[in-house]
Image: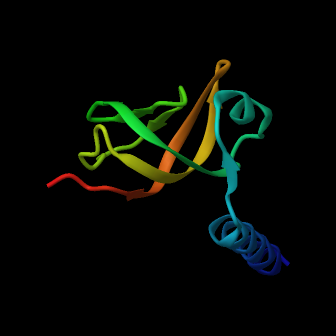
Amino acid sequence: MRKASFAIALAGISILFAILLFSNPIQINNQEQLNKLLDNSKVQLNGKVIKQTSYSISLDNNITIICKSCPPCKNQDIQATGIIKRYKNDTKIYLSTIKIFNKQK
């Protein structure tokens, strides 16, 4: 009985992970739209990078994206996909993928 319960739980977790991985992201354009969404929502946003640190990217639409190893993209247009996380009324987007347009050489 325990083995069957474990197998069913593992299958359920796998299905939920697959849904998150392959679902289409929600397009957002500003902080207001971001605040209306639930935790762990998959979002996609476009913008121009105005500030970049080793752990975050700030866009011209007042949205900050958290990333572990951000590629150099200051003053460039990007399209980013990420997951929304909230902690103590602070909403953050954790980067999943990034596409850089008009790359500078």
Q: How many marks?
A: 0
Residue furthest left as drawn: 105
Of residue 1 and residue 76, the one placed in the foreground of this image is 76
Residue drawn at the location 74% of the way across and 35% of the way down: 33
Quarter of the image with the N terminus in it? bottom right
Of residue 30 and residue 42, the one placed in the foreground of this image is 30
Quarter of the image with the C terminus in it? bottom left
Left or right: 68 as drawn, with respect to 84: left
Residue furthest front as drawn: 102
Residue drawn at the location 31% of the way across and 55% of the way down: 102
- Is 31 located above or below residue 8 in the figure? above
Left or right: 2 as drawn, with respect to 93: right
Figure coloring? rainbow
Residue furthest top as drawn: 88
Residue drawn at the location 64% of the way across and 33% of the way down: 30
Q: Quadrant of residue 56?
A: top left
- Is 84 located above or below residue 11 in the figure? above
Across and down, in percent, residue 64 comes to 49, 31
Left or right: 27 as drawn, with respect to 63: right
Across and down, in percent, residue 58 comes to 42, 31
- Is 4 located above or below residue 77 in the figure? below
Across and down, in percent, residue 44 comes to 60, 52
Residue drawn at the location 65% of the way across and 18% of the way down: 88
Across and down, in percent, residue 69 comes to 29, 47
